[in-house]
Amino acid sequence: MSGPLGPTVAGWEPDASKPLEWGPKADQAALQARARLYAGLRRFFADAGVMEVETPLASHAGLPDPALESWRTAWSSPAGVEPLWLQTSPEFPMKRLLAAGSGPIYQICKVFRDGERGRRHHPEFSLLEWYRPGWGLEQLMAEVADLVRGALGQPERPVEILAYRDLFLSRLGLDPFHAQTAELQAGAQAQAVAGAEDLDLDRDGWLDLLLTHCLEADLGRDRLTFIRDYPPSQAALAHIRPGPEPVAERFELYLEGLELANGFQELTDPREQRRRFEQDQARRRDLGLAVPPLDECFLAALEAGLPASSGVALGLDRLLMVKMGASHIDQVLAFPIEWA
């Protein structure tokens, strides 16, 4: 804003040679579908006795996951300018509420991930996240299926649950728990993944590439497909179930080739969580990425005692894409970032 209320800030300016596109990108049907979806979600959780909460979008800490980039901003506080990080997920403050005794909670909010833009990605998107103290992954997957089938108006849509390892073995002939990097790269080349011969990725990088480029498109076709039991190296904030072959107690939900939700049996061990965060910070330094400060309030909540819980984040823009038959995320957004 310029004039008496503040200085002019240099930045984006509209192209004066073109008519200003001021209207929404989503049509009225999509705008109304979003409003109905949110109303339905709130009824679903009210009936289930799950409390709606609201937590800050900006935090003094950020997620150190090397695969995600946070947006940074600043607060002109009485003590001076303080850096803040826009949330990539509301999970840290929501878990602080759980540790404080909130009971089951959900939140519908905006989250931010820098650098993500494309047909299925937008740097600011809408997320539904909820937590169930005392629940295991099976109970949570059943609730996710009920919620999604209700949102789609498809109560009879089938559900399948596949183990991550079985998916790779049956469809690619690769063991994701034991295959070496060279074997995974050869698998990507055999699947004709463009540029695979020149990529320099670690094991998890190759596994992600194979999942997104060779497997994802066929998942969730005419059904809901849950993939569960991930390699321990991909546990993130999930508990690792011990055994002859330890697995991360985590699932992802796929719907018509789209990754829609990511759920965890939540890690409650503060020492293990700090170790993983510090490992992620070291990886970010090696990659030359910005290193956000650790969320010490979240770690203190774990120290105080996070109840055994399962939790899940579900992308609402993608759910609307499937419901509306949209091929591009812009079709369900009122004002994509280029018009914001």
Image (tube, helix red, strand yellow):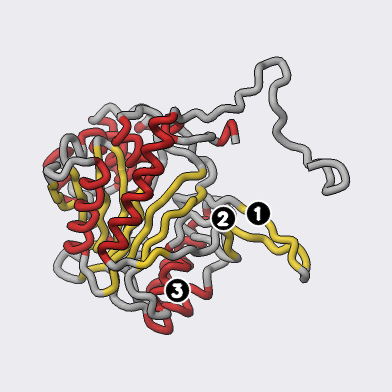
Q: As displayed, is residue 3 above or below residue 332?
A: below
CB atoms at circles 1 and 2 under 8 Å apart?
Answer: yes
- Mark 1: give few (<14), some (14-19) or many (20+) Cα within 10 Å: few
In x, y percent, where is residue 172?
Answer: 17, 38
Q: CA distance from mark 3 to mark 1?
A: 23 Å
Disc 2: which residue = 86
Disc 1: which residue = 73
- Report the amino acid beneath label 1: Thr
- Report the amino acid beneath label 2: Leu
Q: Quadrant of the N terminus?
A: top right
In x, y percent, where is residue 135?
Answer: 23, 70
Task: Of the two numbered discs 3 and 1 on the same chain, state the one appearing first in sequence.
Answer: 1
Task: Please report the residue visible at 15 percent of the width from the left and 45 percent of the height from the top.
Answer: 155
- Mark yes or no: residue 186 visible: no
Q: Residue 243 vs residue 293: left or right?
A: left
Task: Please report the residue visible at 75 percent of the width from the left and 61 percent of the height from the top.
Answer: 76
Disc 3: which residue = 96
The number of numbered badges drawn on the structure is 3
Q: CA distance from mark 1 to mark 2?
A: 7 Å
Q: Between residue 222 and residue 61, name the one nearer to us.
A: 222
